[in-house]
Amino acid sequence: MAIEQKLSLMIPGPTPVPEKVLQALSKHPIGHRSKEFQDLVESTTKNLQWLHQTQNDVLTITGSGTAAMEAGIINTLSKGDKVICGENGKFGERWVKVAKEFGLEVIKIESEWGTALNPEEFKKVLEEDNQKEIKAVIVTHSETSTGVINDLETISSYIREHNIALSIVDCVTSLGACNVPVDEWQLDVVASGSQKGYMIPPGLSFISMSQKAWEATEKSNLPKFYLNLKSYRKSLLTNSNPYTPAVNLFFALDEALKMMREEGLDNIFLRHKKHKLAISNAVKTLNLKLFADEKYLSPSITAIETGEIDAEKFRKIIKNKFDILVAGGQDHLKGKIFRVGHLGYINDRDIITVISAISKTLLDLGEITAIRAGEALVEASKFLDKD
Amino acid sequence: MAIEQKLSLMIPGPTPVPEKVLQALSKHPIGHRSKEFQDLVESTTKNLQWLHQTQNDVLTITGSGTAAMEAGIINTLSKGDKVICGENGKFGERWVKVAKEFGLEVIKIESEWGTALNPEEFKKVLEEDNQKEIKAVIVTHSETSTGVINDLETISSYIREHNIALSIVDCVTSLGACNVPVDEWQLDVVASGSQKGYMIPPGLSFISMSQKAWEATEKSNLPKFYLNLKSYRKSLLTNSNPYTPAVNLFFALDEALKMMREEGLDNIFLRHKKHKLAISNAVKTLNLKLFADEKYLSPSITAIETGEIDAEKFRKIIKNKFDILVAGGQDHLKGKIFRVGHLGYINDRDIITVISAISKTLLDLGEITAIRAGEALVEASKFLDKD
């Protein structure tokens, strides 16, 4: 059983978990209404605010990133509200579905999968909204399905100019990988998940709420109970949680956030940037194509086209020969691309290893020569040797 | 910090976790779209059905028991639907709040906190519903806030006679502690949570859905996305999960369910029964009053009145002197009762220990003599020595 194997996770989540975080996870649970748990919530909340670069409340929900995004949407909006949804991948699609499920009127701003959303289209629609009917702009920062990062800084500047619309942002694979300065960009609702840059297993998600977002909750009429963020805010006043939270994942979160503070935000972002550049340049050297527009490569996931070769076959070879799990393409991209996650607890060795595995697979398939594999290694190392 | 202490949890959840379950929890995560995870879901699902004594689907949600109960309600009902809610404690109250939040018309059947719901009142209301307008009966089996077990077997028989209404049951602190034969009693929706009889930390919840409950989902018009159970059912066909689940808690769940199968349902139920009898009889010997009606004592929690003594003070002594965490009273019961959890991974020694801690606290407060403490020990042992 592979559960027992020495598997290297290079999918966009769950990401690898440091040993001391796993050890924290396996402590005996404590009471979630105890002083000890309150101390834990106080510590994690302070460090979550640091990670989000914000003074806003950052709430922790037991649930996936989807739960956090749904919470952001249903707590700040009302039935019939007009919203813009950016859609250039599977997660963008998902937020459209959520918005429609709750009776919102969706204006879609789309872009081909693999390309970035055009901020100017947001500007245009927002500027034309003289009646200020648009109540929110829902956008995915790093689109996990395609490896594209959208220009959130510019889009959020246009949202601010509109003045009424809230920004509701999926930062699930960007937070903790690249700069997301919540206060500086004035992001209202920011959702993320534990099994990503946070370096802990799945089960917790996080949501940062601005003052403007809290004001919007007062008018929201969509029904909710478990995901009612006002309950979470009220509990946070006593460093608590409205329902029984995943206590052991809080142990892990506390440990992981301390590791992140020790490394420092700039170093974390630089590490992810170097790894992105190393992989993307190596891939090109190997004659493979990057699926995403090279100007908008996600810091966390590199999507690679396999051309004539079935990407699923490619993925299986990498799994079976090298015990490295990379992700497949989703929906119409299945078999056409595979995706390498380089998010969270990833070091230079992991990057060199996955490049070697890709190179050797191509060699075995007769697609490249050994010289080319060597060149890819040299190319990747250029970016890794920088510090 | 007490996190580092050798703390004994005797609250109604989180409950103590066996070492091998904690070890399973701290394994490196695996991909949630992998064959290995599918194998895990197949194994846990089969064992969840065994635990529920059902052929129905049993779904696993990343979230608390409240999330599972909310899911049961919002997936099977529509705005304006008439439902009966049984209310004799804090959890009964909570399901009334959820029902009202989603626009259901609630008929409350109440009973004083500490007493059991009267099944005959359910019978009467259901029989008088000639128009068959009542779409569901929402009831809490073991009321965690008071230590009362409601007569679910009889209530569910009256629901079956009505023929239209679904049963939606909170079995959070009864499942895995006493008999809940889902198929035999024809329970439609049964919710439970991981940090209880399951012996794993909080973060997962479970929901069993009958065929009749699935049929009701087809008519339900309440908005939902993360808690849409149809997505979970569809994923279950491939032993998967619609969103990223708490993978490490699945490792723990698999291990814990295997331990439960090894012990066997009858032995598990007998163990909880013996412990309930040992504690409740020792408490009476110590001149303390049981808060719950003695005919309806929960197998999982014993609520104890402290009379003139502040229950919170009592609780603090037990925590500080004996490192045993017991729960306080909720709402108007705060300071009046404390609650001893004896649910999940609890052995005879734990029961003797908590009785000794209660006895010694009473001794120190000058409430009893040493002879009485000895008598309580003898009384409790009568029930523990039976096997």
Image: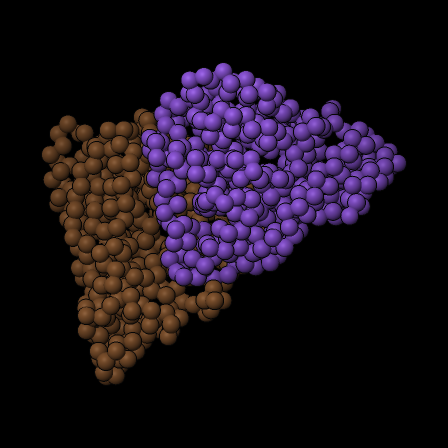
Chain colours: A brown, B purple
Please indicate whether residue B386 sits to the left or right of residue B302 in the image.
right
Q: Quadrant of residue A97?
A: top left
Q: Quadrant of residue B104?
A: top left
Q: Can residue A81 be seen from the camera position used here? A: yes
Please indicate whether residue A132 sits to the left or right of residue B197 in the image.
left
Give the farthest residue toward the right: B371
Nearest to the observer: residue A55 or residue A286? A286
Nearest to the observer: residue B181 or residue B222? B181
Residue at position x 55%, y 48% in the image = B50
Q: Where does the image place residue A52, in percent across and percent down from the top left?
A: 36, 47
Query: How many discs appear?
Result: 0
Q: Where does the image place residue B358, in percent across and percent down from the top left?
A: 75, 37
* In this view, A185 is above or below B123: below
Q: Can residue A273 be seen from the camera position used here? A: no
Q: Where does the image place residue A150, in percent across and percent down from the top left?
A: 22, 51
Q: Which image quadrant: the C terminus of chain A?
A: bottom left
Nearest to the observer: residue A164 or residue B56? B56
* In this view, A352 is above or below A39: below
Q: Where does the image place residue A44, in percent across and percent down from the top left?
A: 46, 47
Residue at position x 54%, y 17% in the image = B124
Residue at position x 49%, y 48% in the image = A250
Residue at position x 50%, y 38% in the image = B191
